[in-house]
Structures are given as structure tokens and as C-alpha cells.
Amino acid sequence: MKTKIKTWFYSLLVLGLLTTIAAGCTKKDDVVDLASAIAGTYTGTINVGGSLSASASSNLSRSTNTIVNLIITIGTTTIPLNGINVSNPSSNNYNLSLTDAGGSFIGTVQGNRLSWTLTAGSDVDVFTGTK
């Protein structure tokens, strides 16, 4: 009978230790909401193809914590660009990137200033603006 009690006691002790270790090793999902930090409308100038400049705005909206959608407005024309990745290499500076078969989009948000370059084949559009 004593052996049975000892076996149960040690089994419960080992189970308790394993449960404590497993609970202490769980991964926390503390993902910072980068997209909300840069969301908003930035107004400025777009340079299309290196030869034409125009007033424009870029509206960044949060899709997920690390993804934004962009609506570019030039006059009455709007151009959507969805699924842009947001990363934060240093405080208050954010990198934006998206690449697909049609081209690439790279940008930065530094404080309240947005700059981006959109490349599609030989066409290169560059925007700079402030919030």
C-alpha cells in the first residue's frame, strides 16, 4: 500500500512540475500594431515617369497589425494598392514593401512624412507627402 501511495505522489509531483514548465514556456503573441501607427492621409506630390509632377494624396489604412492598404488619389482618379507589408526597423521609422508579378512598391514613413516608389516595368512613380 505504501508503494502505491509513493508512486501516486511522485506521479503527481512530476505532473505538476511538467505543467509548470509547459505553462512558463508558452509563446506570447505580443504583436505590435504597426499599421495603426502610420494610418492616415498624406498629401504631397507625385512624380510620374520622371517627367510629370502633380498634387496627390496617399491614404494608408490598417488591414492587419503589419499590413496596410493604400489608396492613391491624383485629381479625381483613385488607385488602390492592397496588402503592403509594414516593418519597423527603428522607432518612428517604418518600412513599406510589396512585390508581385506586376512590379514593386517600397516606401518609408518617418514621423509624419511618407515617401514611396512604385515600379511597374519601366514606369517609375515617386510620391512624397506629409500627414
Image (cartoon, rainbow, N blue to C red):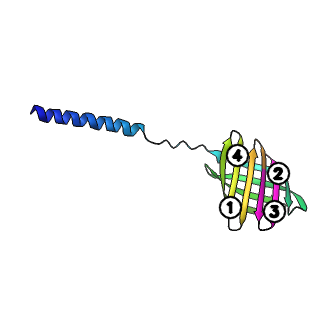
The disc labelled 2 sits on which kind of residue?
Thr
Label 2, secondary structure: give it. Answer: strand
Q: Name the residue under label 2.
A: 128
Residues at circles 1 and 4 in contact by the CB criterion of under 8 Å: no
Q: Name the residue under label 4.
A: 94
Local crowd at mark 1 within 10 Å, few (<14), some, or many (≥20)?
A: some
Label 1, secondary structure: give it. Answer: strand
> In the visual, does 79 lie left or right of 31?
right
Residue at 70% in and 46% down:
94
From the top left corner, tell me how far across and down residue 125 is, in percent. Answer: 81, 60
Mark drawn on residue 99: 1
CA separation, marks 1 and 2?
20 Å
Mark 2 or mark 4: name the one nearer the start of the chain: 4
CA separation, marks 3 and 2?
14 Å
CA separation, marks 1 and 4?
17 Å
Boundaries of the magenta span: 115-130
CA separation, marks 3 and 4?
21 Å
